[in-house]
Structures are given as structure tokens and as C-alpha cells.
DNA sequence: AACTCGGGGCG
DNA sequence: CGCCCAGAGTT
């Protein structure tokens, strides 16, 4: 069956209008007060949506407030140094979000007279603005009736409409976009989309949903069948690879510490770290052309990413002779170190640097 | 369609 | 420990 026909069959006999009204009424009553809900400024909505990708609301709040203080307008962000933007993003993860956001904001300044575009074609062309974010900005900032399908929406609707497609597949998101298109409110698409997400965050949670408190319980097919705990269906992912490194705290005679900037692409791109070499490439007493006196291991740090695991041995060393021959590596005073954006894995080393 | 890309909190 | 989170870009 074609996706379009499947969507038609799923929404057949579903009381969309009653569902809409209950959902929107509940959202207006019960929504959390959040900093990006103070107004409809497209720039603020945009920043919040990027930060919220794969990140919980409670985590985002302090980052959002500090980010807006630092970069109050789109022009401020466009004019900022990338390093300062990454510093404001430090600890939030998925750092390409920050770099793509700045790229996109600069594009808006140069090509759209600093006004966030309000059409699907224009806004979806911006770096970092995918199917979800485009729908979120258009519906929340511009009141357009377009779907904004995230994990919450797929979970909520899979239960309400009894959909057992695997939500780990990208193609499934398109089915839910069709389902939202057939149910969304044209009067208040913003409250409808946010209501679905808010419901997923507060009531229709992944584990043990609060069905007895649900404002749309009477419309929930999964609840009536008693299968809400079995939905959504999601295939599991594979286990992570383990990578072993030795990380150095190298101090010179002036009390400065050696740090290096990671490559422009890939994992933790353009963030800084203490020099780190694969365990099998360690050369005792030598690093990046420097001759060192090794003072032994300080700690073992295990850091887990979504797709891999780092096991780092942290060693302390002092420079005996030589010059740094490695690209993007430099000695920095301990005071200035706080200006450099570090991933959390290496922030764990800061206490040993003093 | 599968992989990459962070980090935290929860059971 | 595994799972999930207001996903997007790359291959």
C-alpha cells in the first residue's frame, strides 16, 4: 500500500476536530513557561529548536538564556567569532548544530535582509534546518499549518492512531507528516504542534505514560486496546566501538599547557582538547616533536558517546626541549584556557591542570 | 537506508 | 548498564 493510502486509512473515522480542540485547550492551560515562549521572535524560536534537537528541555533552558544574552539578535550571532559560539555551546553536544546555525544565520543576513524566511523552500535550504525544524519555525513563529514531526509526535501519534511502523526508520517520519497534515488545526497550528510535543514530554512519556491524566485519552486507540506500553515500535541500534587513547597534560617552563584544536570536520569538530594520541601510537618521552619528562598516569577516564567509547589514560609530563611541530597545537596559559571550548570528555581533565 | 554526531538523566 | 531526548548531514 502506498504511504498516502495508508495515511488515509489510519485517519479514517478519527474524530480529528474533537481531538484538536481537546489537545489545544489542554496545551493552553497546562503548557510550561519556557524562555522561548515569551514571544514569537523567529530568531529565538530558531535558536531554541536547534538546541532542542536530541536534547531535553531542562538541559536547554540555561544554555538558551545565556546564548540569547550573548547573541541577542541574528546580526549579533552572524558577526560573532565561531570560537565564541562554540564556547556558548560547550557541554551541549552535537557541536555541528552551532556551526551550522551560524552559517545559516549569516546566509539570512546576506540573502534575506536579516529576516528569517517564511517559506518552506527558503527556510529548508538553510544549513541545519531539516524537516522538523522547518515545520517548527513555520508553525510556531509564523502560524503556518505545516507538520513538525519529532520523536514526541511520533510516539504520541503512534499511540493515538495505533501505528506500529518502526520509528527508527526515516521513512516513517514521512508517514507521520502525512498524518499531521490530515489532522492539524488551521486556526492554531502553533498550539497544535506544540501541544503534541508537550503531551509527549509531560503525559505520553516513553515509559509508563500517564494515561489516566491524559486530556485526549478518549481518542487514544492504543489506550482502548491496552497496548500503549507496546508503542511506539522502535528497532534498537548496535553497540559502540571502543577507542583507547593516551592524553597528556604537558607543561612548559613558563607554566603553560599544551592544547590542540580538533579537525574542522567530524567528531567534536573545531573544539579544543589536551593532546591525545592513540594508545598504539604512543612514544614514551616524545610528543609532537617535543622531548618530555613523563611524570606518570594521573587518571583513567572512560567517556561514552552515542556511537563509540573513549578510554583515556591521562598522563602528566614536562617539556625538556624542542618545539611543537603539530598543526593547530599551542601552549596556553592556564588563565586563558577558560576561553577555549572543550568537550566534556576533556573538561574532566581540567582539575588535574590546576 | 545506514552512519555519524554529545551528553545527561532515568529506571 | 541501555534507552531516550523538540534531528540533520553525509555517504
Image (cartoon, coloured by chain):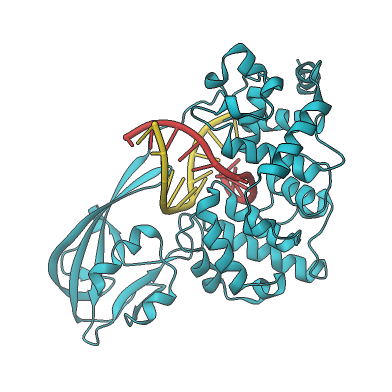
Chain colours: A cyan, B yellow, C red
Is residue A149 visible to the viewer in this orientation of the structure?
no
Q: Residue at x 83, y 55 (%)?
A: A118
In the rendered view, tell whether residue A225 sits above or below residue A112. Answer: above
Is residue A150 visible to the viewer in this orientation of the structure?
yes
Relative horizontal placement of residue A81, taking residue A344 as reference (left or right): right
Quarter of the image with the C terminus of chain A is bottom left
Relative horizontal placement of residue A156, taking residue A241 as reference (left or right): right
Q: Position of residue A27 (x, y in %)?
A: 70, 41
Based on the displayed image, in which of its 4 quarters is residue A257 positioned? bottom left
In the rendered view, tell whether residue A353 sits above or below residue A217. Answer: below
Camera-side residue of A306 and A210:
A210
In the rendered view, tell whether residue A93 sits above or below residue A175. Answer: below
Camera-side residue of A304 and A35:
A35
Based on the displayed image, in which of its 4 quarters is residue A9 positioned? top right
Q: Residue at x 75, y 53 (%)?
A: A125
Quarter of the image with the N terminus of chain A is top right
Q: Position of residue A165 (x, y in %)?
A: 62, 21
Q: Position of residue A308 (x, y in %)?
A: 38, 44
Based on the displayed image, in which of its 4 quarters is residue A146 positioned? top right
Q: Among all residues in the image, which is located at the extreme top?
A: A225
Q: Residue at x 18, y 77 (%)?
A: A318
Relative horizontal placement of residue A57, taking residue A178 as reference (left or right): left
In the rendered view, tell whether residue A116 sits above or below residue A219. Answer: below
Q: Position of residue A194 (x, y in %)?
A: 70, 43
Q: Among all residues in the image, which is located at the extreme bottom?
A: A254
Q: Residue at x 20, y 70 (%)?
A: A286
Amino acid at each position: 500500500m502506498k504511504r498516502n493510502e495508508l495515511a488515509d486509512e489510519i485517519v479514517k473515522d478519527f474524530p480529528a476536530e474533537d481531538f484538536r480542540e481537546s489537545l489545544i485547550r489542554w496545551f493552553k492551560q497546562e503548557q510550561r513557561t519556557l524562555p522561548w515562549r515569551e514571544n514569537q521572535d523567529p530568531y529565538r524560536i530558531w535558536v531554541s529548536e536547534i538546541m532542542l534537537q536530541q536534547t531535553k528541555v531542562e538541559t536547554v533552558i540555561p544554555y538558551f538564556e545565556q546564548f540569547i544574552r550573548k547573541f541577542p539578535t541574528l546580526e549579533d550571532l552572524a558577526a560573532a567569532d565561531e570560537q565564541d559560539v562554540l564556547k556558548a555551546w560547550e557541554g551541549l553536544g552535537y557541536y555541528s548544530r552551532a556551526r551550522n546555525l551560524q552559517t545559516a544565520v549569516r546566509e539570512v543576513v546576506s540573502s534575506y535582509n536579516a529576516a528569517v524566511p517564511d517559506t518552506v523552500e527558503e527556510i529548508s535550504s538553510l544549513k541545519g534546518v531539516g524537516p522538523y525544524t522547518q515545520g517548527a519555525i513555520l508553525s510556531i513563529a509564523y502560524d503556518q499549518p505545516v507538520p513538525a514531526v519529532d520523536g514526541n509526535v511520533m510516539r504520541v501519534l503512534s499511540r493515538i492512531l495505533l501505528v506500529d511502523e518502526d520509528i527508527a526508520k526515516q521513512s516513517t517520519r514521512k508517514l507521520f507528516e502525512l498524518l499531521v497534515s490530515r489532522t492539524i488545526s488551521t486556526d492554531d497550528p502553533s498550539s497544535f504542534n506544540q501541544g503534541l510535543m508537550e503531551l509527549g514530554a509531560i503525559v505520553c512519556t516513553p515509559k509508563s505514560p500517564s494515561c489516566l491524566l491524559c486530556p485526549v485519552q478518549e481518542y487514544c486507540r492504543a489506550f482502548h486496546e491496552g497496548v500503549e506500553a507496546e508503542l511506539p515500535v522502535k528497532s534498537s541500534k548496535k553497540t559502540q566501538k571502543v577507542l583507547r587513547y593516551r592524553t597528556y597534560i604537558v607543561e612548559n617552563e613558563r607554566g603553560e599547557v599544551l592544547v590542540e584544536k580538533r579537525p574542522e570536520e567530524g567528531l567534536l569538530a573545531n573544539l579544543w582538547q589536551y593532546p591525545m594520541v592513540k594508545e598504539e601510537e604512543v612514544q614514551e618521552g616524545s610528543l609532537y616533536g617535543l622531548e618530555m619528562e613523563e611524570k606518570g598516569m594521573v587518571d583513567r577516564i572512560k567517556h561514552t558517546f552515542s556511537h563509540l567509547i573513549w578510554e583515556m589514560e591521562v598522563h602528566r609530563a614536562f617539556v625538556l626541549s624542542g618545539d611543537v611541530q603539530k598543526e593547530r597545537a599551542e601552549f596556553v596559559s592556564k588563565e586563558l584556557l577558560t576561553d577555549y571550548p572543550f568537550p566534556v570528555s576533556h573538561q574532566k581533565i581540567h582539575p588535574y591542570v590546576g
